[in-house]
Image (tube, rainbow, N blue to C red):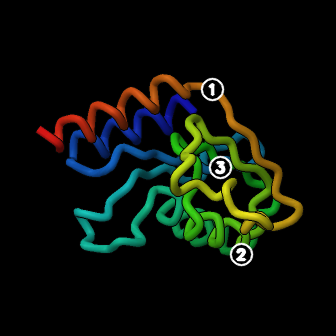
Amino acid sequence: MRIAIEEAQLAYEEGEVPVGAVLTLGGELIARDHNRTEQLCDATAHAEMLCLTAATAHLRSKYLRQAVMYITLEPCAMCAGALAWVQIGEIVFAASDPERGFSRYKPSPLHPKTQWRQGPFEQEALALLKRFFQERRL
């Protein structure tokens, strides 16, 4: 999760919503990225989506059943849908997102076998997000 926080910091510095994601397989780092919606002029260029694209290309597989994704913010419905399609094994996110996070949807948009939990670094992730949006509202 520490690397995901580093990615979120990069997003912040680039003027992107500060969300970072990391994908691991068997403890090995496979992909890392951060939001790039402004840079790529693409509303779908969320950190999770970019990690999934890089990981599936690297592994030459459309399924990531044994992989773990660490994300600084709870995935939105779009990202949860993509995570379902790749059948990700586990999701760990730092901060929940009560407004746009997938956990507010019933039934869950995740694959039934996907495990998920809120993990460490919640305060760090929230502080970065709050600072980002406070600066934009000035």
Label number found at residue 81: none
User: Label 1: few (<14), some or many (≥20) within 10 Å?
Assistant: some
Residue 119 in the image: x percent, y percent? 67, 31
Look at the numbered disc 1 and give the secondary structure of its residue. Answer: loop
Looking at marks 1 and 3 on the same chain, the residue that comes earlier in the sequence is marked by 3
Look at the numbered disc 2 and give the secondary structure of its residue. Answer: helix
Count of numbered circles on the image: 3
Residue 34 in the image: x percent, y percent? 40, 51
**Amino acid at circle 1:** Pro
Whether the residues at callouts 2 and 3 have beta carbons within 8 Å, the answer is no
Q: Is residue 24 above or below residue 135?
A: below
Residue 105 in the image: x percent, y percent? 69, 63
Q: Which residue is mark 3?
A: 69
User: Label 2: few (<14), some or many (≥20) within 10 Å?
Assistant: some
Q: Which residue is mark 1?
A: 120
**Residue at image location 61% in from the left, 45% down from the top:** 29
Looking at marks 2 and 3 on the same chain, the residue that comes earlier in the sequence is marked by 3
Q: Quarter-wise, where is residue 117 in the image? A: top right
Look at the numbered disc 3 and give the secondary structure of its residue. Answer: strand
**Amino acid at circle 3:** Met
